Image (cartoon, grey):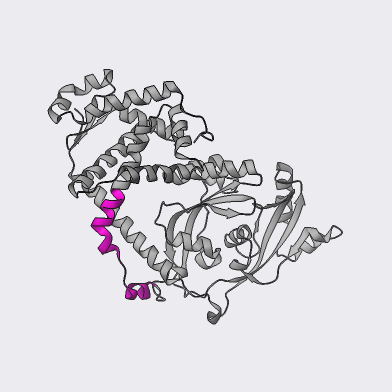
């Protein structure tokens, strides 16, 4: 949303919403022959004339305009007209599949779905609907959008529920040394949103909801909002990161995603983070659990400014190993230099663990801040622990990941099949 949506619906907005509903209702009952007779010329002058037909189910100019306005509210970049058309075609195909399978959703289901969606932006349904109305989006359009998603959820569950189940032997196979995901590198993109004040935290939650609802635009959102040094590359981390190096909570989330999906917001000290999975690549190395790391941090007063960043770059250029930081801090407050004992990722603050995971030995990072200081973080060593020290694998989480991956693949394939078999044309 472009701002926190708290304004109430005005009487004029209610009247406009009622008018749109009354006009759209008889249109839904219009026969296919009548729709064909309207033609594209009429669609240009009548917003409720069909402009696309999917198996003789109409999409109107009004619906496309409503979806486009909704995408604008979500700050979706790109050709919104084209994206609105494609999204509505998919929704029609989902609803047709639901009708063929006898799937129905109740008003209670839809109300709960609208509440869930609005809650992602930390808003009530009433606040969310009021905000949409301010941008010219009718409540009925939001309702239809939610209903199509709920129908598809049931279609996928009914059609693929049995196929998606995994057996204990399949979990055992996934845990074998030859297929174990923990012996892999993960390629991901990140968005780090500042949340060091109540106002910044509310804004971070608002942006996070937008990103989660539009994962295809992750890179653009990273360039626009992220405070990480990866923002210029659309949030993409340059190199693959071994899963064992990441904070356990983050690696578990990433393992349950398929490429293109986005994690739930991950709280960090003074920040909120989102991660998009790009790919996972097997390394061929056996998993040995979380590595032990040692690191040092040098605090540069002044916060994140052009001056402190330039100072950090100058210092980094002079460093060959962590021991060089002792000379940098000579004669200064000893508290400015932090020296760690050997620790594993799950023993570290999440933001420190994340930064160290992206570094090779003797590399530095300047992403973090502490209070009014920019933190130059340097990885000193990373040593794999003995296999006996490795943490046990969560079999339930692994099973859920396998189910989610299988369902996603089956549902995506089914939607593509529906598209391929559909008759999609303009009147």
**256 on left or right of 100:** right
Residue at the spot 43% in from the left edge and 34% down from the top edge: 129
**169 on left or right of 256:** left
In this rendering, the answer to whether 95 lies above or below 85 is: below
The foreground one among 318 and 148 is 148
Quarter-wise, where is residue 296 in the image? bottom right
Q: Is residue 250 visible?
A: yes
Q: Is residue 214 visible?
A: no
The foreground one among 394 and 384 is 394
Residue at the spot 76% in from the left edge and 46% down from the top edge: 302
Residue 348, horizontal then vertical, whole percent: 63, 64
- Residue 178 is covered by the magenta coloring: no
In this rendering, the answer to whether 251 lies above or below 367 is: below
Count the marks. 0
Residue 25, horizontal then vertical, whole percent: 25, 29
Main SS of the magenta part reads: helix
Residue at the spot 35% in from the left edge and 37% down from the top edge: 143
Q: Magenta stretch?
A: 152-174
């Amino acid at each position: 949303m472009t701002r926190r949506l708290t304004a109430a619906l005005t009487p004029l907005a209610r009247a406009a919403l009622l008018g749109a509903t009354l006009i759209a209702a008889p249109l839904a009952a219009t026969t296919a022959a009548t729709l064909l007779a309207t033609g594209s010329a009429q669609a240009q002058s009548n917003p409720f004339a069909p402009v696309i037909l999917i198996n003789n189910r109409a999409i109107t100019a009004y619906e496309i305009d409503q979806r486009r306005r909704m995408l604008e509210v979500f700050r979706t970049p790109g050709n919104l007209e084209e994206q609105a058309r494609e999204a509505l075609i998919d929704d029609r195909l989902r609803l047709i599949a639901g009708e063929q399978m006898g799937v129905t959703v109740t008003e209670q289901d839809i109300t709960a779905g609208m509440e869930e969606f609005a809650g992602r932006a930390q808003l009530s349904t009433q606040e969310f609907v009021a905000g949409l109305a301010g941008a010219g989006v009718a409540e009925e359009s939001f309702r239809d959008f939610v209903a199509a998603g709920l129908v598809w959820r049931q279609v996928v569950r009914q059609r693929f529920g049995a196929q998606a189940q995994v057996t204990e032997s399949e979990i055992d196979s996934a845990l074998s040394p030859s297929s174990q995901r923990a012996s892999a590198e993960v390629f991901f993109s990140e968005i780090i949103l500042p949340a060091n004040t109540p106002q910044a935290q509310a804004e971070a939650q608002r942006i996070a909801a937008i990103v989660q609802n539009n994962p295809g635009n992750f890179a653009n959102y990273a360039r626009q909002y992220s405070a990480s040094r990866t923002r210029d590359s659309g949030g993409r981390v340059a190199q693959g990161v071994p899963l064992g190096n990441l904070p356990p909570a983050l690696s578990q989330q990433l393992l349950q995603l398929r490429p293109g999906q986005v994690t739930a917001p991950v709280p960090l000290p003074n920040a909120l983070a989102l991660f998009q999975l790009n790919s996972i690549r097997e390394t061929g190395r056996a998993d040995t659990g979380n590595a032990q790391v040692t690191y040092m941090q040098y605090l540069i007063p002044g916060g994140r400014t052009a001056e402190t960043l330039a100072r950090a770059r100058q210092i980094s250029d002079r460093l060959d190993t962590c021991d060089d930081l002792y000379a940098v801090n000579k004669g200064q407050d000893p508290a400015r230099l932090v020296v760690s004992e050997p620790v594993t990722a799950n023993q570290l603050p999440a933001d420190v663990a994340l930064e160290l995971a992206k570094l090779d030995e003797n590399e530095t990072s300047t992403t973090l801040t502490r209070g009014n200081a920019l933190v130059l973080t340097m990885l000193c060593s990373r040593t794999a622990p003995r296999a006996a020290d490795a943490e046990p694998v969560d079999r339930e989480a692994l099973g859920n990941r396998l189910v989610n991956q299988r369902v996603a693949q089956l549902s995506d394939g089914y939607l593509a099949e529906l598209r391929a078999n559909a008759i999609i044309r303009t009147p």
